[in-house]
């Protein structure tokens, strides 16, 4: 056979082999009316473990809160109240209280405090169900009021004679003129701000909790305080503040409203003693060019007056009642 005949035979064999393979791979057509076969789907189901199921359950057996004062707890509180400052802060006889370019006025000066708004913060530690130690700090804002009696006036001239000054009792004055003089004089009497700062240590004793676990919502207590208080008057008579030790006794009632919140009502009686330092100058005018010293005019024999700077003020005992309402947090 020739080469051409051999190549032609090989091509025929290869073509026949490829055609047979393609026919074998082509699926036979389904008879008409036969339903098509659907592919089977496989689903993987996952089951929760017993532990995961327990995590989804609601814990209905939470520990119930039992109201009680627990030892070892830290107490933080804020209270708002008042100090009934009704006592005498300063008193001095025959002291200058008013100065004009024409005359100098003096008399018996008395300064009294008035009720003051008093916020206080406290931090405490419960040692026993019946004992708590607290540190406290507070301040108060109020006004003081000055009154002057047995008043005198003297012209600012050499050899001027002091005269009693009471326009209402001066029958030679017209009533309207007397009223104007009296009002002008009283407007010069000080009625200014008074600020106090307090701090110290408190001891709270719950007498009903002796030998007990301290359970219950209502807890009455006794209170003792030792601390210090500073008084600052915006006055022409004083130089700086006056400090004093402070001792107080009282009591209160504490209501445990929640696990961490309490309400507290308290009252205490305070005693302290203060002594202000006199200012060197009563008033300074003309940008400091004119300085009027703080003078006193004690009477001398024969009905006259001596004139001298005020050296000191007497110490004043001050007692007052304070009361407050506050919120307390337990940690």
Image: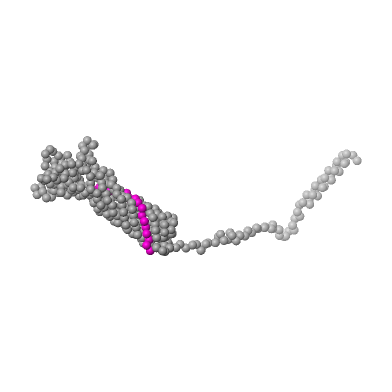
Residue 330: image x %, image y %?
42, 56
The front one of 226 and 140 is: 226
Q: Can the viewer see residue 222 in this picture?
A: yes
Q: Indicate whether residue 192 is drawn in magenta.
A: yes
The chief SS type of the magenta part is: strand
Query: What residue is rendered at 41% in x and 64% in y?
Result: 211
The front one of 169 and 42 is: 169
Above or below, 179 relative to 251 = above
Residue 130: image x %, image y %?
39, 60
Residue 322: which quarter of the image? bottom left
Query: What residue is rendered at 24% in x and 44% in y?
Result: 278
Query: What residue is rendered at 26% in x and 43% in y?
Result: 239
Query: What residue is rendered at 34% in x and 50% in y?
Result: 199
Above or below, 290 relative to 218 = above
Q: Can the viewer see residue 257 in this picture?
A: no
> Which contiguous range is marked in magenta?
191-208
Image quadrant occupied by the N terminus: top right
Q: Looking at the image, which residue sits at the far left?
A: 172
Q: Indicate whether residue 206 is drawn in magenta.
A: yes
| Left or right: where 247 falls relative to 44 | left
Residue 41: which quarter of the image? bottom right
Residue 253: image x %, image y %?
36, 60
Image quadrant occupied by the C terminus: bottom left
The front one of 25 and 293 is: 293
| Left or right: where 180 falls relative to 232 | left
| Left or right: where 228 falls relative to 65 | left
């Amino acid at each position: 056979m020739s080469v051409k005949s051999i190549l032609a035979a090989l091509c025929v064999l290869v073509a026949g082999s490829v055609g047979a393979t393609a026919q074998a791979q082509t699926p036979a057509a389904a008879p008409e009316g036969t339903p098509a076969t659907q592919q089977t789907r496989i689903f993987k189901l996952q089951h929760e473990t017993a532990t995961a199921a327990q995590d989804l359950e609601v814990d209905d057996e939470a520990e119930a809160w039992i109201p009680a004062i627990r030892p070892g707890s830290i107490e933080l509180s804020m209270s708002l109240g008042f100090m009934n400052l009704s006592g005498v802060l300063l008193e001095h006889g025959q002291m200058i209280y008013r100065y004009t370019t024409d005359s100098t006025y003096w008399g018996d000066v008395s300064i009294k405090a008035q009720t003051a708004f008093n916020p206080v913060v406290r931090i405490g530690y419960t040692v026993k169900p019946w004992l708590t130690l607290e540190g406290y700090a507070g301040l108060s804002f109020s006004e003081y009021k000055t009154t002057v009696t047995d008043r005198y006036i003297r012209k600012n001239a050499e050899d001027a004679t002091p005269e009693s000054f009471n326009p209402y009792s001066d029958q030679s004055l017209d009533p309207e003129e007397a009223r104007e003089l009296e009002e002008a004089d009283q407007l010069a009497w000080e009625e200014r701000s008074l600020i106090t700062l307090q701090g110290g240590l408190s001891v709270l004793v719950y007498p009903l909790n002796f030998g007990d676990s301290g359970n219950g919502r209502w807890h009455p207590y006794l209170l003792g305080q030792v601390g210090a208080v500073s008084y600052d008057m915006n006055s022409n008579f004083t130089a700086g503040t006056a400090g004093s030790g402070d001792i107080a006794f009282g009591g209160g009632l504490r209501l445990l409203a929640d696990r961490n919140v309490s309400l507290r009502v308290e009252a205490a009686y305070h005693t302290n003693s203060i002594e202000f330092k006199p200012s060197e100058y009563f008033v300074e005018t003309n940008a400091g060019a004119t300085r009027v010293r703080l003078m006193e005019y004690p009477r001398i024999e024969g009905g006259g007056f001596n004139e001298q700077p005020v050296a000191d003020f007497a110490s004043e005992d001050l007692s007052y009642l304070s009361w407050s309402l506050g919120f307390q947090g337990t940690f």
